Every structure is written in structure tokens, then in C-alpha cells.
């Protein structure tokens, strides 16, 4: 594998990001590419470690040492074939996967000096980068072509939702000859790849060229169709032999403090799709448009969604002193957008209230520092983390805009799930619940929930399957692709009694 001494001869090298002053003026991807020679050198650092922990760390079970070796030897087409055998969309994961494989790279485990270097992956094989290059080489060389099925079956499958889970399932099921229809309530195909993740992380032509490949393979797409509303569940059930729910988990957690209904307080997922639409050239009605130019902004939350708000604010010319507050004991992980401005990122901050200007608009946010202790509160059982305010640490910061990126509770329950009657899991609950019961719970509390499924991705209703964030809660693109692939296998087996679709069993162990 690779070059025997590659990891000793060559340092880790990643391509530089585009310069900050340049990239904040547009919405194009901030990544650049290494030269082919340099990339082959990076692939040669893969060290034949015997047990490929990277491969096990990848939810898709990507055969990383194999394609590293092929890239090192210049066999790019074979590398692409190997990569596609486990991953339908390596150009997505090669750009936006947090790369758990790299955490597990033996070079990271054993050839680094301290925990911080390990966390920053200073010495790892640049797996994600290599993955992206293999996929891009495939597109530029014209090796990625539609692969329509040779034989067709008479089985009809409806996939509700066109995010990475729905798309991966659609491609797998079409390639074994089924009639596959994807329903999407938005006007474009791609789910959060299109209307969540910003262009500076993933340009949308990268998504649309894949969608075109699926279309050419025979997958049928219906956009602007909210199943359960404009297309009835009765029709869905009678027209298809199997249904896959790949509807995502976009029920956002609310901020339950005084002032959260003031003008200027927005859910991140109202802001981000709007930005992506504008970048795509769509116009947003003036009264809906969230304008941030030179305004003071506070972002609540520490995940991807919060960072994506930050990147958009940097590009829209917001006041560069943006606050980002996270409730838990974890400073938001620095991303490239954190280096573009001067954000004030703090962990252990509880928002106490949002203060208005007397005319209904937000003016400031008041918070307090908290600490998390084990069983410190007399009302809590010991062994549970409890939050305590730190007296005297109260503060107020000015704000014209507050963005809520507080995470997601589960799929939208209204409509489709209610009508289908599938059961739901509530985090910490001992039984399953109906959508109506969960809707009731949501009136008073904020439980996290997902759609119940058995080990074959089947919901409580025969012939109705689930995959992606709707099945596992808000997660990652790589997991959504894996879920889509595995659910496709179960659907094929359910319809045909047997299946030739591949599985990635080691990922099941990691679920
Ligand atoms: C802002 C943001 C940034 C992120 N960044 C990253 C990242 O950098 N890296 C990463 O790995 N992950 C990231 N994620 C997470 C990742 O996007 C999700 O885990 C992934 O998209 C889930 O895929 P999915 O197919 O399950 O659902 P989704 O992508 O959510 O797609 C579900 C689709 O179903 C449609 N739908 C729902 N109900 C219906 C209905 N009744 N009828 C018709 N259509 C319906 C929705 O409109 C949507 O298009 C991010 C998430 C967000 C919100
Ligand atoms: S999909 Fe993610 S975890 Fe898997 S090899 Fe690519 S970057 Fe690593």
C-alpha cells in the first residue's frame, strides 16, 4: 500500500484556502485543489498499517487504503471505481464530511505528540481531500456516466425527500431496475445540500450534475409536491409497492425566553435557504428578506448551522464583531469562516432574554455564564450533569439580529407522518408514540424524536421505510448516504425476496 516510506518522507499537505479578502466577496467554494503530483505524494503517505481503522471509522466503509494506493500509482479510474462501490456521492463527502476516518488514521493515533495535535489532525493522511480529487477527476475525464439498469422490474417505489438519503436510495434502487419516483416539496432537488449548506462549502452545480446523472438513469423527480398535503397518503399507498421516508429532521428547537418573538430574531433555517436562493439568482420578496449589511449579529448555537450563518454574515457585510454563544461546555469548533472575521465565540452561555427597542425590534441580548456539574443540584439525581448560573457573570450585548441555530428535534410531524400513522421514538421514552401524541408533547416541551424503524429500516407500517435524518435524528451527509443505501437494500429484498445490492456491515456496528 502506498509508498513504504511515504509517511516518513512527506509531511501532510492540504491546499490553501482562497485568501480571506477574496473569498468574503463572493459565495464560491473557499477550497482550492492540490496539483496531481502533490496529491499522489499525499496518497503515498498511507502506510499499510495492517488494520485500516480509517475504513472502519468511515460510516460508508470506504476502502480508503485501496484508493490511496491506486492514486499513488496514478490509477485514477480504478480508484474511482473503488470509491463508487461504497459511496454514491464522493464529491459531496469529499467536500463537507467532518472526516471521522481521519481521526482514526494510524498516523493520527501514533505519530502525533499531544492531544491537541491529534484533534487538529496535524499528521493524518488527507483522506477527504484525496476522495474529492478522485471524484472530480472522474467528472472532468467523463468517467462518471449514467448507468441505467439493464433489466427493469415492475416494482414502483416512492421516495419522499430528495436529500442525500433519498438520492442515494433512489440511485441504488434504480440500478436494480425498479421504477423510482422522488417527491420533493421544495422547488429544487437536493434537500439540505441545496437549501441548507451554503455555496461556499458546496457549490450547487456539484449537486445538480449528480441529479442529472440520476435522471438519465431513469429516476423520476417531482418537485414542489408536499406529500401529505398536495399528494395524498391514500394515493401514495395505492400507487407504489414501497415507500421510503427520507424527509430529514428539520423541526428546529425553539428559544424559550422573553423577547424571542421580536423582529430581528430568526431561525437559522429561515436565513440560510434564503441566502442560497439569492446566490442561485432567485429574488426574495423585500418583506421576507433578512438583510444583515453592517448590522450587529448574535448567533446562538455551536454546530454546522451556526457556522454557516457566520459565513453568510461575513459575506453580506455584517458588523464583523459577531457573537456566537454555545450553551454547553464546548467552544464552537473553528471552521474556515471563523477566520474570516473576528467572531467572539463563547461556551457555557445561557441566553436569559432578548431585549427590544420599544418598537418591537431586537436591540440587545442578555446572557449569563453557566457551569455544568455532576449531580450538583439538590433536585437532580447524582450522576447527571446539571447547569448552574454563575452569579455576577450576567452581561448584555448589542444585537440587531439574533440567529437561532439551536439544533433540530426531529422530522416535521404535521401532515405526512400523522396521515401515514407511523410510530415515533422519543429520546429517553420507553415506548413508541403516534405523531399526534408527539405533536401534543411539542406544545409544552421540546423532546427529541425520530421515526421508529426496525433493523431493516421498516417503520411500524408494512412497506413504509425510513432513512437519513428522519431515522437517526439530525446527523451528517455521510450517514444519510449510508442510510439511503442500506434502506434501498432492505426495500429491494422486501419487494424481490432477495437482493444483489451491497451492504456495509461494519457501519451497522457503529450505529
Ligand atoms: C445548515 C446545515 C449545514 C450542514 N452542514 C453539514 C456539513 O457541512 N457536513 C455534513 O456532513 N452535514 C451537514 N449538515 C447535515 C446534513 O445536511 C444532513 O444530515 C443531511 O442533509 C440529511 O439528509 P436527509 O436526506 O436525511 O435529509 P434532508 O437533506 O433534510 O432532505 C430532506 C428533504 O425532504 C423534503 N421533504 C420533507 N417532507 C416532505 C414531504 N412531506 N413531501 C416532500 N418532500 C418532503 C425536504 O424538503 C428536504 O428537501 C448540515 C445541516 C444543516 C441544517
Ligand atoms: S466519507 Fe467521510 S469518513 Fe468516509 S472516507 Fe470520506 S471523508 Fe472519510
Image: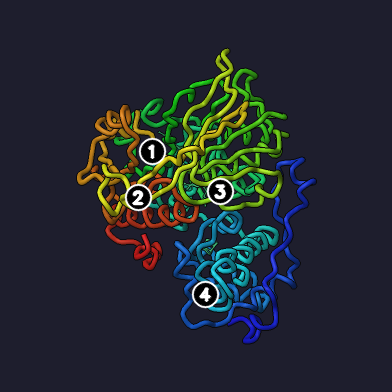
Q: Which residue was labeled with disc 4? A: 109
Q: Report, in whole angstroms, how far the alpha carbon at label 3 lies from the one at label 2.
A: 52 Å
Residue 411 tag number = 1
- Look at the numbered disc 3 and say if its residue's Cβ is closer than 8 Å to ligand 1: no
Q: Which residue is mark 3?
A: 216
Q: Residue lying at the far bottom in this picture: please name it.
A: 4
Cβ at disc 1 under 8 Å from ligand 1: yes
- Front residue of 461 and 499: 461
Q: Identify the secondary structure beneath mark 3.
A: helix
Mark 3 to mark 1: distance in Å? 30 Å
Local packing at callout 4 (Cα closer than 10 Å; few below 14, some 14-19, many 20+) is: some
x then y, percent, for residue 122: 62, 69
**Residue placed most toward the observer, 280 or 23:** 23
Mark 3 or 1, nearer chain start: 3
How far across and how far down the image is residue 2, in percent?
61, 81
Residue at point 49% right, 41% down? Answer: 369
Q: Is residue 127 left or right of residue 427?
A: right
Upstream in the sequence, badge 1 or badge 4? 4
User: Looking at the image, which is closer to me, 177 or 386?
Assistant: 386
> Nearer the viewer's eye, disc 4 or disc 2?
2
Amino acid at each position: 500500500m502506498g509508498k513504504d516510506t511515504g509517511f516518513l518522507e512527506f509531511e501532510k499537505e492540504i491546499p490553501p484556502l482562497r485568501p480571506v479578502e477574496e473569498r468574503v466577496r463572493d459565495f464560491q467554494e473557499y477550497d482550492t485543489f492540490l496539483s496531481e503530483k502533490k496529491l499522489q505524494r499525499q496518497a503515498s503517505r498511507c502506510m499499510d498499517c495492517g488494520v485500516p481503522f480509517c475504513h472502519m471509522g468511515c460510516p460508508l466503509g470506504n476502502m480508503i487504503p485501496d484508493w490511496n494506493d491506486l492514486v499513488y500509482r496514478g490509477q485514477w479510474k480504478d480508484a474511482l471505481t473503488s470509491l463508487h462501490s461504497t459511496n454514491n456521492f464522493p464529491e459531496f463527502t469529499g467536500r463537507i464530511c467532518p472526516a471521522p476516518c481521519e481521526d482514526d488514521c494510524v498516523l493520527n493515533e501514533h505519530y502525533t505528540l499531544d492531544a491537541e495535535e491529534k484533534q487538529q489532525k496535524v499528521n493524518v493522511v488527507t483522506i477527504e481531500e484525496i476522495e474529492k480529487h478522485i471524484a472530480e477527476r472522474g467528472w472532468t475525464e467523463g468517467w462518471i456516466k449514467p448507468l441505467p439498469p439493464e433489466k427493469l422490474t415492475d416494482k414502483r417505489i416512492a421516495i419522499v425527500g430528495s436529500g442525500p438519503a433519498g438520492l442515494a436510495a433512489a440511485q441504488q434502487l434504480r440500478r436494480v431496475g425498479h421504477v423510482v419516483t422522488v417527491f420533493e416539496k421544495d422547488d429544487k432537488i437536493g434537500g439540505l445540500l441545496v437549501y441548507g449548506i451554503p455555496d461556499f462549502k458546496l457549490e450547487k452545480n456539484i449537486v445538480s450534475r449528480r441529479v442529472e446523472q440520476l435522471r438519465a438513469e431513469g429516476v423520476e423527480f417531482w418537485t414542489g409536491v408536499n406529500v401529505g398535503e398536495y399528494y395524498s397518503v391514500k394515493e401514495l399507498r395505492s400507487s407504489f409497492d414501497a415507500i421510503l421516508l427520507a424527509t430529514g429532521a428539520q423541526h428546529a428547537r425553539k428559544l424559550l425566553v422573553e423577547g424571542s418573538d421580536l423582529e430581528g430574531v430568526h431561525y437559522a433555517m429561515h436565513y440560510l435557504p434564503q441566502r442560497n436562493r439569492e446566490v442561485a439568482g432567485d429574488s426574495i420578496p423585500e418583506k421576507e428578506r433578512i438583510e444583515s449589511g453592517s448590522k450587529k449579529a448574535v448567533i446562538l448555537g455551536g454546530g454546522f448551522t451556526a457556522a454557516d450563518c457566520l459565513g453568510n454574515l461575513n459575506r453580506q457585510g455584517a458588523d464583523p464583531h459577531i457573537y456566537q454563544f454555545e450553551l454547553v461546555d464546548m467552544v464552537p469548533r473553528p471552521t474556515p469562516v471563523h477566520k474570516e472575521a473576528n467572531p467572539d465565540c463563547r461556551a457555557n452561555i445561557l441566553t436569559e432574554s432578548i431585549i427590544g427597542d420599544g418598537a418591537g425590534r431586537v436591540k440587545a441580548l442578555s446572557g449569563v455564564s453557566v457551569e455544568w456539574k455532576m449531580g450538583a443540584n439538590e433536585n437532580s439525581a447524582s450522576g447527571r450533569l446539571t447547569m448552574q448560573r454563575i452569579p455576577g457573570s450576567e452581561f448584555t450585548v448589542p444585537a440587531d439580529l439574533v440567529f437561532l441555530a439551536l439544533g433540530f428535534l426531529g422530522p416535521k410531524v404535521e401532515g405526512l407522518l400523522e396521515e401515514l400513522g407511523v410510530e415515533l421514538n422519543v429520546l429517553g421514552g420507553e415506548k413508541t408514540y403516534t405523531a399526534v401524541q408527539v405533536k401534543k408533547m411539542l406544545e409544552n416541551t421540546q423532546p427529541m424524536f425520530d421515526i421508529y424503524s426496525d433493523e431493516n429500516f421498516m417503520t411500524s407500517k408494512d412497506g413504509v421505510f425510513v432513512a437519513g435524518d428522519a431515522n437517526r435524528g439530525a446527523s451528517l451527509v455521510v450517514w444519510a448516504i449510508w442510510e439511503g443505501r442500506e434502506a434501498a437494500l432492505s426495500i429491494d429484498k422486501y419487494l424481490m425476496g432477495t437482493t444483489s445490492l451491497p451492504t456495509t456491515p461494519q457501519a451497522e456496528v457503529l450505529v
